[in-house]
């Protein structure tokens, strides 16, 4: 059990929880669940193909995007939100790349979220919330489809926690390849 693992905090000061640190996810169960989800997604016609980008490059890009989002908070909060989401997405892509996976197709972001949640349960639950709001901001249809600096700051904090969690998962070396 990993229940005795020491607590790690993110750059934002929040506890980092990769779902394994507190022993809530048994690696064997997570692997089985992830394999089942991947098989279901492939059966639905969604493709998962071998990755061609390395995790280090993707994680470096995620950190760079977080920095860029922080610069944009006051001048362009909606874009800061979009960039924060992209940071979380790059961290998620790094995990999948480590597993020799890359999502493709128009539902790729949703597939990515499903595969991550299958393996790490709620750790990447916020990814879906960021993804949905990102879609609203990128394709506005109402006056609510704009962000203020407070919302952008919350998105950056959430994305930072997701990036930090991804880094912890990658450092532990507990991922399986598909």
Image (cartoon, rainbow, N blue to C red):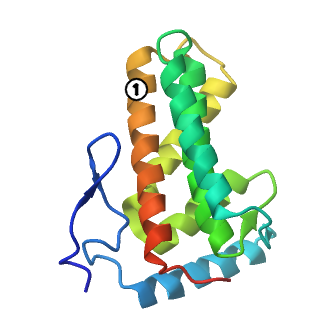
Outermost residue, left side: 4
In what quadrant of the picture does the N terminus appear? bottom left
Q: Classify mark 1: helix, strand or loop.
A: helix
State whether residue 117 is above or below residue 140: below
Vertical relation: 144 (above or below) 64: above
Q: Is residue 144 above or below residue 163?
A: above
Q: Along the horizontal axis of the image, is 120 left or right of 41?
A: left
| Any part of residue 131 in sight | no
Q: Residue at x 54, y 27 (%)?
A: 69
Number of numbered discs: 1
For label 1, count other residues whose C-alpha is less than 10 Å away and answer few (under 14), some (14-19) or many (20+): many
Name the image quarter holding the C terminus. Answer: bottom right
Q: Nearer the viewer, residue 17 or 121?
A: 17
Residue 146 screen position, x and y as percent: 55, 16
Q: Is residue 52 left or right of residue 14?
A: right
Residue 64 is at least partly visible in this image: yes
Residue holding disc 1: 153
Q: Residue sitting at 62 percent across and 59 percent down?
A: 56
Horizontal and vertical percent position of residue 108: 72, 55
Q: Quadrant of residue 5?
A: bottom left
Residue at 27% from the left image edge and 46% from the top image edge: 14
Residue 39: horizontal and vertical position, in percent?
69, 81
- Of residues 140 and 21, the one nearer the viewer is 21
Whether residue 163 sits left or right of residue 103 in the image: it is left
- Where residue 17 sits, quadrant-wise, is bottom left
- Depth check: give the residue in front, 118 or 15: 15
**Residue occupying image coordinates x 47% and y 11%:** 74
Relative image position of residue 13 (x, y in whole percent): 26, 43
């Amino acid at each position: 059990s990993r229940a005795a693992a020491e607590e790690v905090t993110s750059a934002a000061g929040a506890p980092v929880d990769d779902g394994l640190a507190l022993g809530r996810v048994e690696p064997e169960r997570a692997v089985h669940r992830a394999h089942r989800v991947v098989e279901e997604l492939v059966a639905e016609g969604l493709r998962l193909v071998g990755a061609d980008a390395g995790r280090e490059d993707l994680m470096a890009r995620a950190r760079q995007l977080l920095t860029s989002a922080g610069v944009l908070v006051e001048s362009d909060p909606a874009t800061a939100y979009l960039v924060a989401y992209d940071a979380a997405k790059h961290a998620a892509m790094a995990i999948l790349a480590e597993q020799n996976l890359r999502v493709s197709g128009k539902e790729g972001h949703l597939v990515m979220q499903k595969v991550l949640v299958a393996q790490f349960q709620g750790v990447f639950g916020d990814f879906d919330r960021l993804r949905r709001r990102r879609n609203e901001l990128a394709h506005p249809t109402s006056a609510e489809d704009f962000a203020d600096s407070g919302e952008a700051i919350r998105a950056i904090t959430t994305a930072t926690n997701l990036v930090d969690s991804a880094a912890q998962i990658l450092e532990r070396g507990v991922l399986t390849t598909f």
